[in-house]
Image: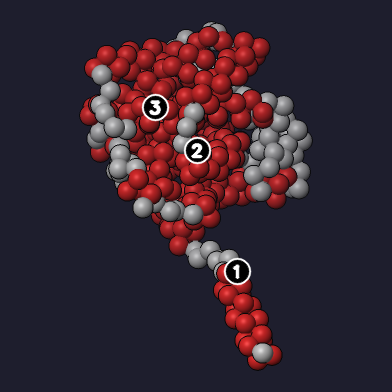
Amino acid sequence: MALARNPSVQPAGEIRALNTIRGVAALAVALFHAPTLFGVTTTLPHAYLGVDLFFVLSGFVMVHAYEARILGGLGFGRFMQLRLARLYPLLALATLAGFAVWGLMQLAGHAPFVAGVTPAALPISLALLPAGTGVAYPFCTQSWSILWEILLCVGLFAWLRWVRRGALFIAVTAGCALLLIALDQGKVDGGWTAATFWIGGFRALSAFSAGVVVRFATRDRRIPALVTGLAVIAALVACVYVAWVRQTAWWSDYLTVAVAFPLIIAGAANGGRLLENWAGDRLGEASYSIYLLHNLTIVLLGPVGKLARHFGPGAGMVFDVAWMAGLIVGSWICWRWVEMPLRRWVSGLKLPRPRPRYHRTRLAVRVQAIGRGSLE
C-alpha cells in the first residue's frame, strides 16, 4: 500500500560504478596510513577524506537500497539487523585481531602500536564505545566511523518512514557546521581520537545527508550533461588534491567534501559507464575488508618493509607492490569466505517477536463478557 501511494519509489538495483569508487576510496585510506611501509613521511596527503566519500556513498546507497522497502513495511528491528549484519561482524573480528596483535607486542616487549591501552578497552571497543584517551578505538581505529554510520542509519529509518522532507535543509545545516569546524581546525580531519570524536559526527552527518540529497535529486531523472561534466572535473581536482598537494587548506578540505564528492557520486550514478568493470566490482567487494584490516597489515609488516629497503630501492618497490596486491587479494578472500558468510548468518537470525497484546485484550474482553453473561 505504501508503494502504491509512492509510485515513483521502485525497488533498488545495483549501481556498478559505485563499487569502483568505494574500492578506490578504501585503498586510498589504506595508502594514507602506510607511509612507514613505503619508507616516506607521507603517501597520499589528504586521503583521510576518503572516509567522507564513504559517508556520501552511504547516504546515497542507503536511500537507494532501503527507501522502497521501508515504505513497503520493513520494520525497524529487521532493518537494523540487516545493517548490523553488514557492518558489525567483520568489525568485531578486526577489533579482536587488533587486540591479539597488541597483546603479542606486549608479550614480546615491543612498544605497543597504541600507547596507554589496557585489556579493559576490549569489551568497550566491542560495544562500539570510545575506549581510549588518545585514539578513541585503540584496536581498530576505523570503528569511530562505523559507530556514526550506525547512528545515522537509525535516524534515516525514522526520517524515511515518518518525515521524508527537509533533506536539503539538513544537509545545508550540517554543511554549515562542518564549515565552522574547518575554519576553526584548519581542516576537516577528526573523529578518530577521543578529543575529536564529536567532529566525526559532524563529518558523518554532513556527508551522509549530502548523499541522501544526491539520491533524491537523481532518482527520477538523469542529471544534465553539465552536471556530468562538473563531476568529471571535480573528480580530477579531488584526485590531485588528495594525492599530490601536501599543503592543507581548510577551504580545500571543505570543498572536496561538500562539493566535489557529491558531484562525483551524482555523475557516477547516472553516467559512470567507464567505472563499470570487473576489476572495479572486485575492488568494491573487498573495500570494507580493506578499510578495516589494512592497519593490521601495516603493523605486522612494518619491520619487513624496513628490511626490504636495506636491499635497495628495487626491493623496496617490490615489497610495496606486493603489499598492495596482497591487501587487495587477501581482503577479497576475506569478503568471500568470512564477511559474506557472517553477514548471511546474522541476517538469517530470527528476531524475537513481541507478544501481541491485542490477543490478551480480546481474551480479557471475552472472559469479562462470559462472566457478565453467567451472572445475568
Q: Dot 2 surroundings within 10 Å: few (below 14), some, or many (20 or more)?
A: few
> Which residue bears the numbered disc 3?
214
Q: Residue at x 30, y 43 (%)?
A: 7
The disc, 2 or 1, on the residue closer to the chain's N-terminal end is 2
The residue drawn where x is 71% and y is 31% is: 194
Q: Nearer the viewer, mark 1 or mark 3?
A: 1
Q: Are marks 2 and 1 in contact (CB under 8 Å)?
A: no
* Labelled disc at residue 163: 2
Residue 57 placement (x, y as % from top left) = 42, 32
Q: Is residue 249 left or right of residue 278?
A: right
Q: Which quarter shows the C terminus?
A: bottom right
For badge 3, the amino acid type reads Val
Where residue 130 appears, as percent x and y from the top left, is: 69, 39
Tell me the amino acid under the disc marked 2.
Val
Q: Nearer the viewer, residue 25 or 167?
A: 167
Q: Is residue 78 above or below residue 60?
A: below
Is residue 337 visible in the rendered image? The answer is yes
Mark 3: few/some/many CA within 10 Å (<14, 14-19, 20+): many
Please name the amino acid that badge 1 sits on. Answer: Arg
In the rendered image, the residue lying farthest to the bottom is: 374
Judging by the rendered image, the residue that carries numbered circle 1 is 357
